[in-house]
Image: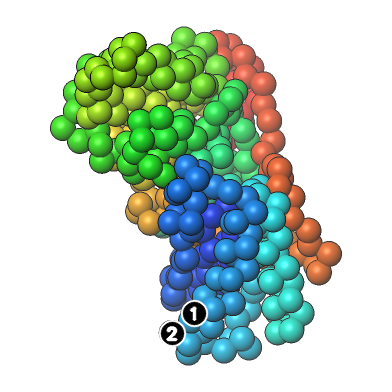
Amino acid sequence: MSGFLTLGIETSCDDTALALLEGERDVVCDVISSQIADHSKFGGVVPELASRKHQEALLPLLRSLLSQTGVKPCDIGLIAVTAGPGLMGSLLVGVMAAKALSQGWETPLIGVNHLEGHLYANVLANPGLIPPFLCLIASGGHTELVLMRGRGEYILLGSTRDDAAGEAYDKAAKLLGLGYPGGPAIESAASGGDPSAFDFPVAMRGSGAVEFSFSGIKTSLRTTVQKLNGPDGTGHVPIADICASFQRAVTESLLVKILLAVRTTGVKKVAISGGVAANAALREALTEAGHKRKFDVYLPPKKYCTDNAIMIAAAGKASFDRGIRSGLSLTPDPSWSIWRRTEFMYDTPKYQAATIRL
Ligand code: KG4
Ligand code: ZN
């Protein structure tokens, strides 16, 4: 190892993750401690429990990372830590640890935006992916379609009006008794099911703007299940068909807006990230649409879709290279946003040309 080493630390939600990255994209080591087993009995993430678990896991993970690699603190050139958005208590654990390490090791520190990290999962995994590109970030807390114009230049094209796509999967799985996290549970229960068996709503399909909504589909699922169960609760609920149809509707809701963004911006490179990007139905549908409509599709490996510290290290290193630094005054911001917003008038090409100059 002779290159610049970045230590990435991610504790924004329910995964404690650390990684060592050499240069811009060579992963030396990554370790992760998942809290799924701790939260699953509650059907979702319990914030107080999450921060306690981060506290327990972080230092043992760091020791294991250093002993596995033989890397010494003095070899590390940068500490990159998620500073928001996320759960305040969880973020605090990572940021405080990073500040202490930065001071003790005399190593530069940088606070990374978690969603910028999700974007960098793609940059990291695809050396050929050069901005501008479109990226859908779909996770348990976010559904945002972003145009990455260049390094550090992000335009929010649109987001969800209510629930996030991953949240819809989690709530649906809870309702169907399939456990947490819901996405992988629904995906595996959907296998062999008929995706056209039930007609769940694709919200905002014709709205003409990049915006998502997933609260209606949740209600529709509840009503459908209640009807199938019948008044005495003994009716047959065909789980595979329901899950396949639910997955199809969520996938279509995401795809419709990706296609709209491709048309309106003229950008022909599309990436996806966040936990929902691990969903095989979405990956297939997007790949197929890319072939048909002649745009390039970039899919990060599934391991990079869900929360990890590799992407945080990569985003941190990119900011560091642009001269950005955080001092010891770094504080977590649970609702930190880095997007510039744009008001699109989708059917006026002149306006688009003026707004989105690529
Ligand atoms: O990015 P992530 O690990 O954490 C957040 O920042 O939220 O995303 C977790 C979310 C959960 O809502 C989970 O149900 C969903 O991503 N998810 C999936 C799949 N794997 C994880 N959704 C659909 N299909 C999957 N295979
Ligand atoms: Zn995430």
The residue type indicated by label 2 comes to Gln
Q: Residues within 10 Å of mark 1 (few under 14, many from 20)?
A: many
- Which quarter of the figure has residue 179? top left
Tell me the quadrant of the picture where the C terminus can be found: top right
Q: Residue at x 73, y 68 (%)?
A: 96
The residue type indicated by label 1 comes to Leu
Q: Position of residue 9 (x, y in %)?
A: 59, 66
Relative height, residue 229 to residue 90 (above, below): above
View extreme (left): residue:
192
Q: What's the distance in space between the residues labelled 1 and 2, CA to CA?
A: 5 Å
Q: How many circles with numbers are drawn on the protein?
A: 2
Q: Position of residue 209 (x, y in %)?
A: 55, 17
Q: Position of residue 224 (x, y in %)?
A: 35, 15
Q: Is residue 123 in view? A: no
Relative height, residue 175 to residue 236 (above, below): below
Q: Residue at x 44, y 74 (%)?
A: 29
Disc 1 secondary structure class: helix
Q: Residue at x 52, y 65 (%)?
A: 17
Determine contact: label 1, label 2, CB under 8 Å. yes
**Viewer-closest of 336 and 286:** 336
Q: Which mark is residue 68?
A: 2
Describe residue 331's horizontal placement relative to residue 63 as left or right.
Answer: right
Q: Which residue is mark 1?
A: 65
